[in-house]
Amino acid sequence: MDFFNYSDGQLMAESVSVAQAAERFGTPCYLYSRATIERHWHAFSDAMGGREHLICYAVKANSNLAVLNLMARLGSGFDIVSGGELARVLQAGGDPAKVVFSGVGKTEAEMRQALRAGILCFNVESEAELERLNRVAAELGVSAPVSLRINPDIDANSHPYISTGLKQNKFGIPWDRAVPVYQRAAQLEHLRVTGMDCHIGSQLTEARPFVEALERLLGLMDQLGDEGIELEHLDLGGGLGVPYTDERPPSPAEYVKALLPSLGDRQLKLILEPGRAIMANAGILVTKVEFLKRGEDRDFAIVDAAMNDLLRPSLYGAVQPIVPVQPRQGEARLYDIVGPVCETGDFLGKERRLALAPGDLLAVRGAGAYGFTMASNYNSRPRVAELMADGERLHLIREREPMAQLWQGERLLPE
Ligand code: LLP
């Protein structure tokens, strides 16, 4: 549930008029709702009851400092995948002792940065990474906390680009190598083996694959226990889906409830890394209709936001609702909602039935996760402003990129 609703014929973000926000800060802009973010975060945390746990928000979903700072104030942990994300978390006041570091390609510099910051755990994805981490930790004279990301070979039934837990995917340590790699990790002097993790995919709409992955991992943990390797935590990754249109994923509370029985009374800390489920429906992309164009085959609404601002429709064929900010009377027609970028693949939505006039504002819903973070400057388009509604207040949390920033750092060749 979110806090974007109509009141008196106007779309509101909490108690802020979306039209007034657009008037004040221009379009396109991302607009988030603080109450929605907090509600979603608490939905995970509250469902845990008394069980020891840590919610590590997946920073890649939305890494604006104001968002990360809200998470930090809630006591959240963070799942990061780069040195840049770690720097953001620290800049936003996040606690490094609640940070887990995922990703298949951690560089030595990133390992040093994270070891110096004192993160909770490295989610190691390969044998080579394990050896590298041991070496870097030795150089710094410290011991690195390690979890191994196990690939449980489970079909998440999601889009192939965002399914990660099958054996043909690049992620994690293959199931049949898990025990020997744990044994190796336990031998390495500068590693401290503390956990096990997995992440089977994103936008999952049922709890079953998560429960299966959890049970597989628990079985493996028992096996390791017999070998004298005891772990403190199990990190099940992120991946819970959201209703963009007619998907009906379990709620965070239902998802957590589905997991808890398998854990029983094990003394094991459960870590989750949700990104989308917290942020997607906590944000909209507000865009203005520049032109309406009759095609031979279909009509086009040409808007001022484009694939460089919101890539999901172009990249995955993702369908996100597009709604009028101030619905108007009149004939509804079928439109492709397209941007100004010079690519046929530049669309935000296809065949949407809307009554439109030039100058109208539209809101692309479900845009709070993997929206701004996947934006680029393609076609030399400055990245858009980000705003946050908080009750009746509206905050600018990232200014629209000034033109000159487009070539910042670029140099001409000498004469
Ligand atoms: N943990 C790990 C290790 C991950 O790789 C991911 C996402 C997450 C947590 C968070 O997953 P979530 O709860 O957000 O599903 N750009 C794509 C999504 C890519 C997700 C990649 N990994 C999209 O827009 O649909």
Image (cartoon, rainbow, N blue to C red):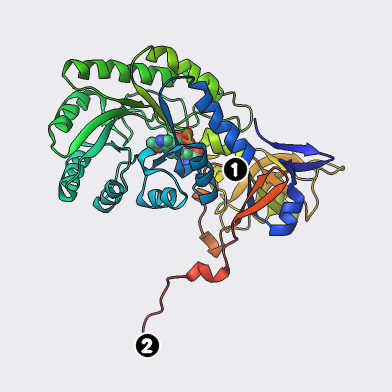
Say which label, 2 or 1, has the lower sequence index: 1
Q: What separation in Å lies between label 2 and label 1 (alpha carbons)? A: 46 Å
Crowding at mark 1 (Cα within 10 Å: few <14, some 14-19, many 20+):
many
Observer able to see residue 99:
no
| Residue 410 location, quadrant | bottom left
In this image, 361 relative to 31: left or right? right
Q: Is residue 154 above or below residue 345?
A: above
Q: Is residue 45 above or below residue 27?
A: above
Q: Nearer the viewer, residue 88 or 209?
A: 88
In this image, 325 relative to 238: left or right? right
Residue visible at 28% across and 32% down in the picture:
147
Residue visible at 16% across and 19% down in the picture:
228
In this image, 324 relative to 84: left or right? right
Give the x, y percent position of residue 4.
70, 38
Q: Is residue 6 above or below residue 205?
A: below
Q: Secondary structure at mark 1?
A: loop
Give the x, y percent position of residue 98.
38, 38
Ligand 1 closer than 8 Å to the CB at disc 2? no
Observer able to see residue 327:
yes
For residue 367, the mark is: 1
Check disc 2 and give the amino acid type: Glu
Check disc 1 and give the amino acid type: Ala
Q: Nearer the viewer, mark 2 or mark 1?
A: 1
Q: Quadrant of the C terminus?
A: bottom left
| Residue 247 location, quadrant | top right
Quick check: which quadrant has ligand 1? top left
Give the x, y percent position of residue 176.
22, 23
Q: Quadrant of the N terminus?
A: top right
Which residue sits furthest right?
329
Q: Secondary structure at mark 2?
A: loop
Residue visible at 43% across and 51% down in the picture:
88
**Residue identifier under label 2:** 415
